[in-house]
Amino acid sequence: MDPHPPKYVMLPENQGSIRPPPYRRNVPRYQSKSHKSGGNCCLRCICCCYCFLVLLIFLLGTLAFYFYAVYQPQVPSYKVEEFTTAHFDMKPDFSLYTEFAVTVKADNPNSKIGFTYGKDSSVEVVYQDSTLCSGQIPAFHQGYKNVTMIKVILKGKSDFGSGLQEALMDNRKSGKIPMEVKVTVPVSVVIGEFPLRQFKVQVTCNLVVDNLTPNKKAGILSNECFPKVEF
């Protein structure tokens, strides 16, 4: 036995035509970047939207701070100054015809902001949720640091039941008649000569008057007004 075997293999003659398999080159595989690039695009869009939103909030906050710092806006105050009965006629069929003259005081405390009161307004006098009469405020402009007295004539006919008529008569005898004056008016804020957005002001004044005698000014025993703004 040969102690050193040969380093090659002898093939038989009948297998001399065997050839080694062809050499296969390893082609490098590349991952598709379409999904990754699409994700990066969405991320950039989200970041841009957030940056725009933050910038918009900052600008709006800056404008609001500038507006409040420069113009120092204040809400106008309202009060019923006079309440006069022109007609107060109770009919046998429990209907009631009334005519009142109501003077409303509008106080604008702003030194750089004016108000324009529009035409589509309404004023109502209400007793126990029943409207007695109604009218309108004339359109007008209120300037800076201005107090305006608005006189409104209200007329109306209402159908009272016997119970409501009896309650009203009892209040008249006691000299304490609870009434409500409800005002709804469109108002535009005016800065300089430029009117801004129009909004609706609703004022409810809870009154207690001492009489409803025709052609006599009623004494106002209690007077509380609550404004409300609708944008």
Image (cartoon, helix red, strand yellow):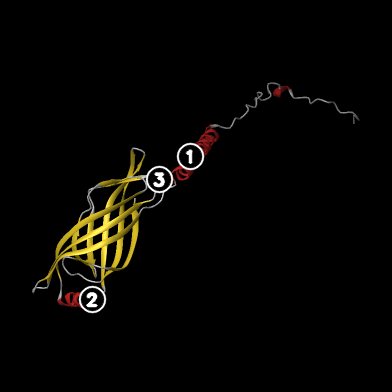
| Foreground: disc 2 or disc 3 | 3
- With respect to residue 67, does 137 lie above or below? below
- Dot 2 amino acid type: Asn
Count residues near mark 1 (Cα–Cα under 10 Å), then give few for <14, some for 14-19, many for 20+: few
Q: Is residue 88 above or below residue 105?
A: below
Most foreground residue, 122 or 57: 122
Nearer the N terminus, badge 1 or badge 3?
A: 1
Reading the image, the residue beneath label 1 is 59
- In what quadrant of the picture does the N terminus appear? top right
Nearer the viewer's eye, disc 1 or disc 3? 3
Which label's residue is closer to the chain start, 2 or 3?
3
Q: Which is more N-terminal, label 2 or label 1?
A: 1
Name the amino acid, label 3: Ser
Neighbourhood count class around disc 2 (C-alpha, 10 Å): few under 14, some 14–19, many 20 upward: some
Q: For mark 3, what is the residue?
A: 111
Which quadrant of the figure has residue 217? bottom left
Question: Which disc, if any, is residue 183?
Answer: none
Residue 179 position (above or below residue 70): below
Residue sitting nearer the eye, 5 or 226: 226
Estimate the x, y position of residue 179 in percent, counting from the top left: 25, 68
Q: 99 or 55: which is nearer to us?
A: 99
Residue 142 rendering spot, x and y as whole percentages? 31, 46
Per the image, label 2 sits on a secondary structure element best described as: helix
Nearer to the camera, 14 or 113: 113
Is residue 47 toward the left or the right of residue 113 in the image? right
Q: Residue at x 24, y 63 (%)?
A: 83
- Label 1 close to label 2 by CB (< 8 Å): no
Say which residue label 2 marks. Answer: 171
What is the three-letter code of the residue carrying label 1? Leu
Q: Quadrant of residue 156?
A: bottom left
Q: Of helix, strand and loop, which one carries label 1?
A: helix
Distance in Å between CA atoms under marks 2 and 3:
43 Å
